Image (cartoon, rainbow, N blue to C red):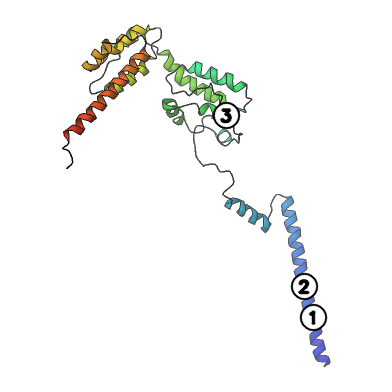
Amino acid sequence: MFKRLGSRGKSVSARSDSYKKCSHSRYTEGLSESEDSESGHWKSRSKKKKSRKEEDDLSQPWVCEETGPFTPRIRYFDFPKTRMPSHIKTYDGSEDPEDHLKIFQTASKTVWWAMPTWCHMFNSTLTGNARVWFDNLSTESIDSYDDLKKAFFENYLQQKKCIKDPIKLHNIKQRDRESTEDFMRRYKLESRDVKGAPECMSIFGFVHEITNPELIKHLHDKILKTVNEIMRVTTYFLMGEVAASNHERKKSFPPWK
């Protein structure tokens, strides 16, 4: 019986030693974890679970990983939601670049935007050819609003210097196989660079260079005083031609029986 008690005592003692070792191991592990946290190396399992949870939380704000003309500090700047002032218009490269920049900067000064916000908001005004120009800038070449303004001026002020003389309007001719609609669009774009040309000269230049005889006769029958008027009349004429063509095409099909 004493032997049994003795062996039982040894078993209890062994368990006690094992428990102490376990407790000591957990304690030293806790100290090590605390020390690591103080030195900047945190090894907590709970933190790992938290970060994993945060990664799986699809409701968190997300930014698409992409490159572009903006440097990371501009591209990933966390600016608050803001509205563009209503009188700031978009810019497609065909208007005066100085006018667009002045209007944008004057409005921006009243809303107290941070510098990266200036960059993003100015970028949002660019459309058409101006958007293509911005997208083709060197990767991460824009690190401030001054960089963006400089690149914008270098490109568009150079175009502004190429202003044509009024007589150059007569060199804007309709090309072979160019539709009247395409020529009208190109004439409007290229004639904007011709400063100081009287309205009558712009009208005469357009009418003189189109090749559609029916349209020429139609325009001569009207008394048009502005380029906008002549473009509107031309647009309606072309729409009428399309409608008439569709009507003739329908008539050529045999009726259903």
Q: Identify the secondary structure beneath mark 3.
A: loop
Q: Dot 1, crowdedness within 10 Å: few (<14), some or many (≥20)?
A: few
Q: Amino acid at mark 2?
A: Tyr
Q: Residue at x 76, y 62 (%)?
A: 28
Q: Is residue 51 left or right of residue 225?
A: right
Q: Amino acid at mark 1?
A: Val
Disc on the earlier residue, 1 or 2 = 1
Determine which of the numbered discs, if any, sits on residue 83 in the image. Answer: 3
Q: Is residue 55 left or right of residue 188?
A: right
Q: Nearer the viewer, mark 2 or mark 3?
A: 3
Q: Amino acid at mark 3?
A: Arg
Asked if residue 211 can be seen in this view, the reply is no
Quarter of the image holding residue 119?
top right
Quarter of the image holding residue 198?
top left
Q: Identify the secondary structure beneath mark 2.
A: helix
Disc on the earlier residue, 2 or 3 = 2
**Closer-to-camera residue (47/96):** 96
* Residue designated by label 2: 19
* Quarter of the image with the C terminus in it: top left
Q: Nearer the viewer, mark 3 or mark 1?
A: 3
**Closer-to-camera residue (253/151):** 253
Q: Residue at x 67, y 54 (%)?
A: 47
Work out which residue is located at the far front of the displayed protein and give it: 257
Tally the marks: 3
Quarter of the image holding residue 33?
bottom right
User: Marks 3 and 2: in contact by CB < 8 Å?
Assistant: no
Asked if residue 131 can be seen in this view, the reply is yes
User: Marks 1 and 3: in contact by CB < 8 Å?
Assistant: no
* Residue designated by label 1: 12
